[in-house]
């Protein structure tokens, strides 16, 4: 009986091993991981040179890990097993109150100081004499981490540093108008359909009048697996992505700073994955791509302009922002005839006068706590 069990165990083991080997050989290459939002390793080139210098074996190891059969299923089992064994996070990601998040700590006071100093220098050198506002967007850990026993940034000290460096500019508090429910459960970002109070807070300080709340039409896209969903590999149902349209967003003219034929200029078209697409405030055709949040203003762009034809105001706004700004800016249309969004992670500060005519615009610096806590991002 014991011998039979041993034989059966060996047979099952060999069947699994050979089955996985056959599946690995027979299955076509997967070009990218939707869960991890990255391109997967391709089969390495076999040559005498790559074998002799060790490059072939190194890249083969990466290739086999990336193309392993049932890779996502094994990642999910590994993550659940870690939690079952008492680990509170999986590779720096955790699940609490139905939300996925990443561990963001400790406070990098030097990075916050340098980033705030950079923004203040921009305000004083590029935007002297203009109305300058600044706002800080709390990451979801502000509402989630500490009360669930996870380490957290020292937000009070962060804001003390920011206020000290940004003296003389008008602060708009967003901490008090946000809650955990205003963020996606599987992503770092806030939910646009919940941001009307945020838009109202910004409008009150900047002295503009926004379209009525009932003038928006909600559009829902399924299913949104945010930036935490894949890396965490934890079982949680996807989000819905909702975007709000109104006459201003539907008729807006959107341009982005792009390079075409060796020339850098503003264009109403953008090329994504080899396809030339017309720019719109919302681009639902990008949903389901590498990052579905790109639905908002086509994702990461150095400079984007949004103009409202036949606007009833001539006021303009420049937003110095990170990715959170893509979903709040459309809600400010109508209060402004033109909004320019600038991401100084992708364009050097001293180059801005080459692309933006600075006249009498309002200026809003709006960054998340996560960006302010990271060094070396601003150019």
Image (tube, rainbow, N blue to C red):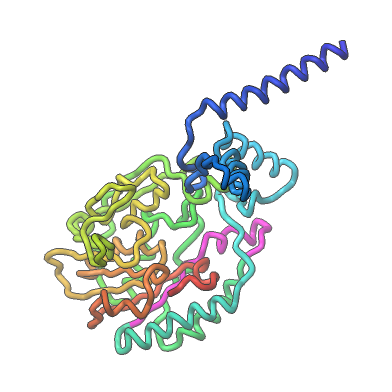
Q: Residue placed at 25% from the left, 50% from the top?
A: 276
> Where residue 33 appears, x then y in whole percent?
49, 42
> Where residue 3 appears, x then y in whole percent?
86, 13
Left/right of residue 238 with respect to residue 269 in the rendered view = right
Quadrant containing the N terminus is top right
Residue 236 visible, this orientation? no
Q: Quadrant of residue 323?
A: bottom left
Q: Is residue 165 above or below residue 46?
A: below
Asked if the stretch drawn in magenta spans residue 356, the answer is no
> Where residue 46 appears, x then y in whole percent?
54, 40
**Span colored in magenta:** 132-152
Quadrant containing the C terminus is bottom left
Q: Is residue 27 above or below residue 296?
A: above
Residue 22 visible, this orientation? yes
Left/right of residue 372 with respect to residue 291 in the rendered view = right
Q: Quadrant of residue 307?
A: bottom left
Residue sitting nearer the eye, 181 or 251: 251
Asked if the stretch drawn in magenta spans residue 140, the answer is yes
Q: Residue placed at 37% from the left, 60% from the top?
A: 300
Q: Residue placed at 59% from the left, 41% from the top?
A: 60
């Amino acid at each position: 009986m014991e011998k039979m069990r041993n034989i059966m165990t060996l047979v099952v083991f060999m069947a699994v091993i050979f089955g996985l080997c056959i599946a690995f050989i027979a299955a076509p290459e997967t070009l990218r991981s939707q869960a991890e939002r990255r391109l997967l390793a391709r089969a390495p080139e076999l040559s005498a040179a790559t074998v002799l210098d060790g490059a072939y074996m190194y890249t083969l190891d990466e290739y086999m890990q990336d193309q392993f059969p049932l890779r996502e299923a094994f990642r999910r089992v590994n993550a659940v097993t870690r939690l079952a064994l008492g680990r509170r996070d999986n590779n720096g990601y955790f699940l609490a109150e139905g939300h996925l998040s990443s561990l963001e700590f400790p406070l990098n006071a030097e990075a916050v100081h340098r980033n705030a100093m950079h923004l203040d220098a921009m305000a004083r050198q590029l935007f002297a004499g203009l109305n300058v506002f600044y706002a800080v967007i709390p990451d979801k850990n502000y509402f989630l981490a500490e009360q669930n026993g996870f380490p957290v940034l020292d937000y009070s000290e962060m804001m003390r540093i920011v206020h000290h460096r940004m003296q003389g500019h008008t602060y708009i508090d967003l901490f008090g108008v946000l809650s955990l429910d205003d963020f996606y459960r599987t992503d770092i970002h806030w939910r646009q359909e919940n941001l009307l109070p945020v838009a109202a807070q910004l409008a009150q300080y900047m002295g503009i009048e926004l379209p009525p709340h009932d003038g928006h039409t909600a559009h829902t896209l399924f299913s949104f697996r945010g930036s935490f969903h894949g890396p965490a590999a934890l079982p949680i149902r996807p989000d819905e992505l909702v975007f709000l349209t109104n006459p201003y967003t539907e008729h807006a003219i959107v341009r982005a700073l792009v390079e075409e034929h060796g020339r850098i200029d503003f264009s109403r078209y953008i090329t994504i994955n080899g396809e030339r697409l017309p720019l719109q405030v919302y681009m639902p055709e990008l949903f389901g791509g590498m990052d579905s949040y790109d639905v908002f203003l086509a994702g990461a762009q150095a400079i984007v302009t949004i103009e409202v034809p036949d606007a009833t105001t001539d006021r303009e706004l420049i937003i110095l922002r990170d990715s959170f700004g893509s979903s709040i800016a459309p809600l400010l249309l109508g209060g402004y005839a033109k909004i320019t969004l600038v991401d100084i992670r992708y364009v050097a500060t001293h180059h801005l006068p080459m692309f933006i005519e600075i006249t009498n615009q309002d200026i809003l610096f709006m960054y998340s706590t996560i960006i302010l806590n990271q060094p070396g991002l601003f150019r």
